[in-house]
Image (cartoon, rainbow, N blue to C red):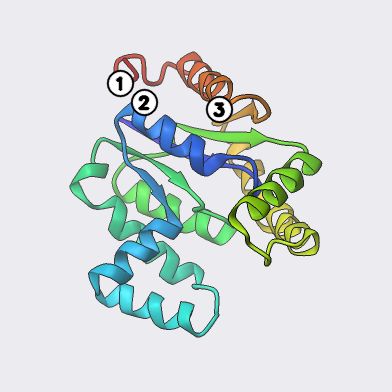
């Protein structure tokens, strides 16, 4: 039973690492983007609400985001654990997640904080934009996204730090080096020895 959260600024590689760590531990990687797309594709009531909001160009509210994630975490494949990516993204969502987990007599086992210098994040996103031909990832847009992360998401790390569950991991290096660092830090907590075999 391993319940993880991975947090890092845009360009930190958290999506890639999240999938790798989830595979190593045999748990589903639950990214908010994927959950929204899944709910929309399934045509559920929640999915229809999300679709309408996204099509209007608005942000999905904390309440609706939390409802969609709760629904996803209630599915059978998440019974033995999960890795969250992109949720909770602010203090309000932390409270929603706490309430959901407490209702199941559970809590997060560890929060992986991928630490990447701001310049590295900007360089990575710019490179990805160039490779994918994405003109919307200008330096200004990237800087704005990083500012939102610092303002809204970084404070959740303080909450989890007071609970003693945050592992700061250097997010600079090869994919394998970073994955190995994360797994080593989780194993130091006594997590995943059996599951990561």
Residue situated furthest left in the rendering: 76
Examine the rendered structure and indicate whether residue 24 appears above or below residue 147: above
Residue at mark 3 to residue at mark 1: CA–CA distance: 20 Å
Whether label 3 touches label 1, CB < 8 Å: no
Residue at mark 3 to residue at mark 2: CA–CA distance: 14 Å
Quadrant, the C terminus: top left
Q: Which residue is identified by label 1?
A: 195
Examine the rendered structure and indicate whether residue 79 appears above or below residue 31: above
Q: Residue at x 51, y 52 (%)?
A: 86
The percent coordinates of residue 16 (x first, y second) are 50, 39
Examine the rendered structure and indicate whether residue 180 appears above or below residue 54: above
Q: Which residue is identified by label 2?
A: 24
Q: Residues within 10 Å of mark 1 (few under 14, many from 20)?
A: few
Q: Residue at x 45, y 70 (%)?
A: 63
Q: Nearer the viewer, residue 71 or 115?
A: 115
Residue at mark 1 to residue at mark 2: CA–CA distance: 7 Å
| Disc 2 secondary structure class | helix
| Disc 1 secondary structure class | loop
| Disc 3 secondary structure class | helix
Q: Residue at x 65, y 55 (%)?
A: 129
Numbered tag placed on residue 175 in the rendering: 3
Whether label 1 touches label 2, CB < 8 Å: yes
């Amino acid at each position: 039973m391993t319940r993880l959260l991975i947090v890092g600024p845009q360009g930190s590689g958290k999506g890639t690492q999240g999938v790798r760590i989830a595979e190593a531990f045999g748990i589903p990687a639950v990214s908010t983007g994927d959950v929204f797309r899944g709910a929309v594709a399934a045509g559920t009531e929640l999915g229809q609400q999300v679709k309408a909001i996204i099509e209007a160009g608005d942000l999905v509210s904390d309440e609706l985001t939390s409802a969609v994630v709760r629904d996803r975490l209630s599915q059978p494949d998440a019974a033995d654990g999960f890795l969250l990516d992109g949720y909770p993204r602010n203090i309000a969502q932390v409270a929603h997640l706490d309430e959901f987990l407490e209702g199941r007599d559970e809590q997060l086992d560890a929060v992986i904080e991928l630490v990447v210098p701001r310049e590295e994040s900007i360089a990575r996103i710019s490179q990805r934009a160039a490779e994918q031909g994405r003109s919307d990832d200008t330096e200004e847009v990237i800087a704005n996204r990083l500012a939102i992360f610092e303002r809204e998401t970084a404070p959740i790390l303080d909450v989890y730090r007071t609970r003693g569950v945050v592992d700061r991991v250097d997010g600079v290096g090869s994919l394998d080096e970073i994955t190995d660092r994360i797994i080593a830090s989780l194993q130091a907590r006594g997590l995943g020895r059996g599951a990561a075999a």
